[in-house]
Amino acid sequence: MTSTPAPASDEAVPDEAVPDQDVPDQDVPDQAVPDEAVFVEVLTDEELSVLERPGAMAVMPFLDELGEHDREVARRSAYRSLLARGIVDPPTPESISQATAVRDGSVDLMVRQDVSALIALREGAEVIVAIARTTATTQDFWYAHLVQDVVLIEEVSKDGLHRFALQRGEDLVDAVLAAAVHPDSGDAVGEPVPVTGEAGDPTPPDVVLEALGAAFVRADLIVRRVRDHAPPAFTVFSGPEGCWLVSPDPGNAAAPVVAEPVSAQEARDRVTDAVDGVRAEMEALRG
C-alpha cells in the first residue's frame, strides 16, 4: 500500500488521492512490463476523480454529465466503493489530525499498490496517444500513456468505465494501430472528398459513408508529448471497403478540409509516423 494525499472532510471523503512518486525517474519492475497487454483494474469516472489530481487528459463521460450536487454524491459513493473493494484504506487518526493542523484540505490515504502505480504512470506519461473511436453503433475512447519502456493502456466506455492494462513500450505502435485502424481495412480509390460537417461531428462525408457501409471505424487521433505546442491530430476512416485520411492544417483554419482516399497501408503508415515522430521528439528532449 502507498500513502497518498487526499482532501479531508467531515466524512473523510477525499477529493483526490494521488501517488507521491515521480514516475519517469523510478524503475519499473520486470514483472510489470509483460510481453502482451495484461489487465490491471477497472475504475469508474467517480473513483478516478477521488484518486487522481485534476488535469488528466482522459475523458470522464459519465461524471461530466452530472450537475455539481450529483457529482459530489457520486464521488462520495465512489469513495465508499474504493474502501469496500480494498483499493484504499480510510485515513488514520494521525493523518486526520495532521490535515486538521495544516488546514490545506488534504489527508493521506493508503492506496493499493497496483492502483497507485497505474495512477502514477498515467500522470507521469511522457507521450500520450488519445483516440476517440466511433462505429456505426458505438463510441468509446482509447489512450496509451508511455513512460520510459512501459505503456499503460486505458479504454474508456461511454458510461465512464476505465479499463487499464500494461504493455511493453516497444509494442506501442502495434497497440495504436490495432485501436485505430479496422483490422480488415481495404484500399480506397477516387478523388478527395470535402468534409463539410461541423467540428466534432463523427459522421463521415456522405460519399465516404456510402463507400464504407456499416462496417467502419472512425478514429480521431492526437499524439501528445511533454511540453508540445502543435501535437499531430488527424482522423482515419477505415473499413473493408477502404480508408480515408482527414488531416486539417493546424496553421490555416480557413484551409478546406478533405477526406483523402488512401490504401490500408498508407493509413497505417500515417498512424505509425505520428507516433514514432512524437516519441523521437520526446527522446531528443530527454537527451
Image (cartoon, grey):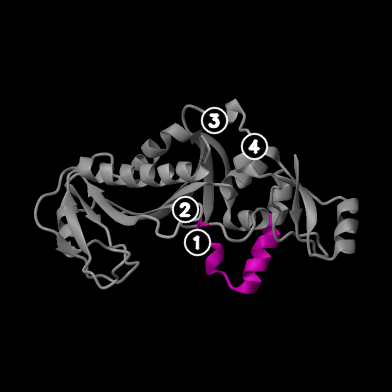
Going from N to C along the chain, the mark reached first, 3 or 4, is 4
Give the x, y percent position of residue 227: 50, 55
Q: Is residue 68 magenta?
A: yes
**50 sits to left or right of 287:** right
Q: Is residue 169 visible?
A: yes
**200 sits to left or right of 144:** left
Can you identify the residue that label 2 sits on? Answer: 157
Going from N to C along the chain, the mark reached first, 3 or 2, is 3
* Residue at point 70%, 61% (across, down): 15
Q: Amino acid at mark 1?
A: Pro
Can you identify the residue that label 4 sits on? Answer: 26
The residue closer to the viewer here, 260 or 215, is 260
Q: Amino acid at mark 2?
A: Ser
Q: Rate crowding at label 1 as few (under 14), some (14 to 19) or many (20 or more) other CA atoms within 10 Å.
A: some
Q: Are marks 2 and 1 in contact (CB under 8 Å)?
A: yes
The residue closer to the viewer here, 65 or 58, is 58
Can you identify the residue that label 1 sits on? Answer: 61
The residue tagged with tag 3: helix, strand or loop?
Answer: loop
Give the x, y percent position of residue 101: 90, 62
Magenta stretch: dominant SS? helix
Can you identify the residue that label 3 sits on? Answer: 33
The residue tagged with tag 4: helix, strand or loop?
Answer: loop
Figure check: 7 above or below 66? above
The residue tagged with tag 1: helix, strand or loop?
Answer: loop
**227 sits to left or right of 119:** left
Q: Amino acid at mark 4?
A: Gln
The quarter holding residue 2 reads: top right
Q: Amino acid at mark 3?
A: Val
Image: magenta residue range: 57-78
Give the x, y percent position of residue 281: 43, 46
Distance in Å between CA atoms under marks 4 and 2: 30 Å
